[in-house]
Amino acid sequence: MHKMVDEFFDLEKIEANLRNKASEQLAAGGMDPLTKMRALCLTRGATGIHGLGRAFRNMDDDGSKALNEEEFTKGVKEFGLDISKEEIKQLFRSFDEDGSGSINMTEFLLKLRPPMSQQRIAVINQAFAKMDKTGDGVITLADLKNVYSAREHPKFKSGEKSEDEILTEFLHTFEGGRGNGDGQVTKEEFTNYYASISASIDSDEYFEVMMKKAYVLQ
């Protein structure tokens, strides 16, 4: 389990590479609106796309997972993405295929997620299944205590943080910033995080080895 600690901190370097790569893409220009939005999200790190999704969900009062153009525009602007009104309109029209005036935000966020090979998806699923010890579809502190050795963490050894504080920090990594305070990570959040990390790694083999080392997978 201690291997996860070392690999977890290696992700900080990978995230920095991700942000730089996205910034370079934006500087080069010539992107379609969806690719531009994806790059803008990734300049915020691996939880950027999840953060945009959370902004959308905050406006989904009826739980329909559908957004009209006004809500969609408001979500993009509130999240602070530098994208023009015309680009937002193009995005909305491209996803409103039936002309109903609304789009499914789950489907939109899936399209926004950087594409991955089946090899990468499989190892992400394997890692999530290992973490989700109870099999209830979410990773909690109780799950983590079975697979993540927080006692090997340098901040635990120095007395700076407790085991629960370190585990909570680990969970919040997948949610962005301080997380949303629910103390759990869904499969969507976990997959979105690693899909973003994946965007900065060219080799399927390297990505798979990284995941297997981090989560001690067979």
Image (cartoon, helix red, strand yellow):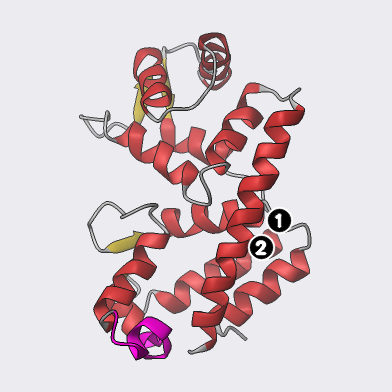
Q: Tell me, yes or no, whether the highlighted magenta stretch contains residue 155.
A: yes
Q: Is residue 45 left or right of residue 208?
A: left
Between 131 and 103, which is closer to the camera in this rendering?
131
Residue beneath the point at 31% across and 55% down: 178
Residue extent of the magenta highlight: 146-160
Seen in the picture, residue 19 relative to 106 is either above or below; the reply is below
Distance between mark 2 and mark 1 Cα atoms:
5 Å
Q: Quadrant of residue 201?
A: bottom right
Q: Which residue is mark 1?
A: 117
- Which amino acid does the dot numbered 2 rest on? Arg
Residue 212: percent from left, percent from top? 62, 79
Can residue 138 be seen in the rendering of this structure? Answer: no
- Which amino acid does the dot numbered 1 rest on? Ser
Q: Is residue 189 left or right of residue 168?
A: right
Asked whether the beta carbons under mark 2 and mark 1 sit within 8 Å of each other, the answer is yes
Residue beneath the point at 51% across and 17% down: 92
Q: Quadrant of residue 97?
A: top right
